[in-house]
Image (spheres, rainbow, N blue to C red):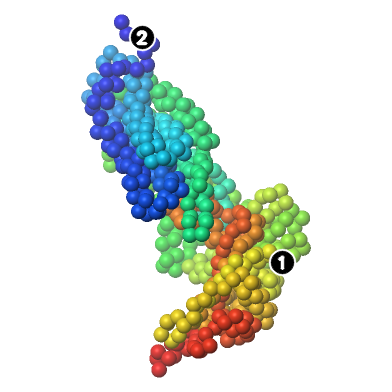
Amino acid sequence: MKSKTSFINKTMLQKNVKLYWPIWTLYTIVLLFNGPFSMWSRFKSAYFIYGTNWHKYMLDIMSPAISMEADMIFIFVMALVTGMAMFSYLYNSRACNMIHAMPVTRRQLFSTNVLTGLLFMWIPQIVKYIMSFVICISYGNTKVVHIGINLLATMGISFFMYSLVCLCAMITGQLVSVAVMYALVNLLYGGAVIAIANVLTYVSYGLSYMEFVRKISVTWFAPMLQLLNRVGFHPTMKNTGDDYYCIKYTFRGTNTIVVYVIAAAVIYFISYKIYKHRDLENAGSFIAIPKLKPVFRWGLGSLGGLILSIVAASLLLGLRISIGVPAIMMLAVVLGIIAFLLLEMIIRKNFKIFSKALFKEIIAFGAFVVVVFGGITVYGNVQENYIPKLADIDSACIAIDFDINLEGKDVEKILETQKILMAQKKDYFKKRYDDSGYITISYTLKNGEKVNRVYHRTDDFNPHKQCKAIMAEENKPQNITNAIMQCDTTDITFINGSAEQYNDKYVDVLNERFNGKVAADIFEAVKKDVEAGVMQEYNLQGMLGGVDKDTSYMYNLMLNFTVPKGNRVEKSWNGYDATWYEDLLDILGVTKEYSDFGDARSDGIETYSVNIRFGENCTNLIAVLKENGLISSKEPLLTLSCKIKCDKG
C-alpha cells in the first residue's frame, strides 16, 4: 500500500523522463561539447600551441569547463523549456481535467514535476563535472576544485531559475505566456527603473541617468542580470616576459547564489500554494489568476506609456520639435491607455472589450498615469535644485573640456558654475534638438555620498565665455598636463617609450624605442611646452575655447608609464573587453566597472600608455627628441597639412 504522505509519484516521474528525454539529452550534449570536450580539444593541441612548457597554461586550458557565463545562459533557457514541458498539461482544458482526475494529488503532481525538472538540469551538470574531472586528471591537472565549485554554483542557479519558471507556470494559462512572464519576471523591475530614469532625465535638468539607476538595486530584482553580473571565476594572471597566463581562479558570487537559493525555497512554496487553489477552468487563459489581471494591465500599461512617451519625444527631437512637460505627460497618458487596451485584448483573447465598467477603469488608469508622471516630475524638480553646502563637500570635479578636481574653498568655483548652468534650463528645453554637448559635475561629500549632475547645452551657450572661473582652472599648466597624460601625473613612473617618424609616402623613416629615463626627459619637455602655451593646441584641439588645428607632425610618440594606486585616471581607462551581456548591463546602467564622474582611480600600480602630439612650436620637446636621436637627420619633419598640399601639388 502506498504511503499517503508520499510527495513523489514514481509513475509520473518515469513518464516525464521517458516522454521528455530529448530535452535532458540535448542539454547533456550541449554541456559536454561546451565544457569537457572543448577543454579536451585544448589539451590535445596544447603542445603545438604552447610548446614544451604547456603545463603552466593548465588553468587557461580548463577555462571552458568552468565558464559560468555560458553555463548560466544554458540554465536560463533549459529551466524555461523544462518547466513548460513539465506543466504543459495545465494549458489544455482536456489534458488538465484528465491529469487531475487521476488518483494523484496536486501536491504529488507539483513535487514530481519540480523534481523531474531539477533532475533534467542537475544530472547533465554532474555528468559534465565527472567528464571534466577525468580529463583534467588524465592530463596531470590536479587543480580541479574550480570544477567542483562550478558544479555547485550551476546547481544552485538551476534551483532558483526553475523556481521562477514554476511560479510563471502557476499564474499563467497558456504555454506562450509562460515564456512572456518568465522574461517579465527577470527584466520587468530593471525595465521599470530605466523607464522612470528616462522620464526623470527628460523632465528635469542636470540629473544623471546613471546615478538614478544605480541608486536602486536593479539587478537584485532582475535575477538574470544579477547573476551574469555577480557570479563567475576571476583569473589572476602572471606576466613574465612574453608569457601571460593564469595562475589561479577566484570565485565570486557565493553570497548572491545563497540569497537566490533561499528565495527559491520561498518561491516553490508560493507556487505550490497557487497550484493547490488553481481553478481548472482557467486553462487557456493568458493570466490564470483573475486577481492578477488588473495588476498586469495597469502595471505594463503605465510602464508602456512612460517608455513610449519618451520614444515619441525623442523622435520629435529628430524633427527639431521640442515638447514640454505637459505635452509629454499627455503622451504618456494616451499611449499608456493604448497599451492598457491592447493588454486587455490579449487577456480576453477578443477585440470586443469595451464596456461601461472598462471606460470607468480607463479613466482611473489615466489618472494613475498622471499621478505617476507627476510624482516623477516633482521628484526631479526637487533633486535638480539641490546644491550641497560647501561645508559638506570633501572634493568636487567638473568637466567642461576635461576633468578638473578641486578641494577646499576652490570648490566654490564649481558651485558658482553650477548655478550658471542651472540658469540655462529654459533655454535648453526650448532647443534640446541643438544639443551640442554636456558638462558634468561630481561632488564627493564628507559622509562618503556622491552627488552627480549632467548639464546639456545648446550652441547658444558658450561655457568658455560664461564659466570663466573653471576656464581659469583648465588653463593652469598642471591641469593641462594631467589632461594630456589622461591621469593625475603625481608620482607616475616612466618605463619606456617609442618614436616613429614618417615621410611624405607614409613610410616610416625612424622607428626607435627608448628607456624610462628618456621618457621622463620627454615628459619634462612636454610640461615646459605646456607652460609656454604651445603643447595644448596639438593635444587639446577644439578645447579651451580654441579651434581644431590639424598641423601635428607625421610622427607617433608614445610614452609608457605606471600610475600609483589611488591616482585619478581617465574614466575610459576603467573599461574592458565587453561581452554581449556586459554591453547590455552597460545600457541598463549596472555595469561592474561604472565609476562616478571624476572619481575613476587606479586599483593598484597600473601600466598605461599615451600618445603625445606636437608641432613646430613645441621647441622644448623637439630639442629633447633631437638630443636623443629620435628625429631622423636625413628626412624633414612633415605635418599632415603639408603632406596634403604636396599631394594636391
Residue 627, above or below 445: below
Q: Give the foreground label among 1 and 2.
A: 2
What amino acid does circle 1 point to? Answer: Lys
Left or right, 295 with reference to 380:
left
Looking at the image, the residue that sits furthest to the front is 52
User: Residue 524, located in which quarter of the rendered image?
Assistant: bottom right
| Structural crowding at the residue carrying mark 1, measured as other residues with C-alpha within 10 Å and reported as few (<14), some (14–19) or many (≥20) | some
Where residue 481 appears, as percent x and y from the top left, is 64, 72
Quick check: 187 left or right of 211? left
The answer for how far apart the CA atoms under marks 1 and 2 are is 78 Å
Instruction: Give the total number of marks visible in the rendering.
Output: 2
| Front position in the image: 288 or 487 | 487
Kindly identify the residue that appears in the image at 49 percent across and 81 percent down.
Answer: 510
Residue designated by label 2: 4
Residue 620 at least partly seen? yes
The N terminus: image quadrant: top left
Identity of the residue drawn at 77% across and 63% down: 409
In percent of width and height, residue 435 lies at: 51, 68
Check the image and report above or below for 67 versus 508: above
Quadrant position of the C terminus in the picture: bottom left
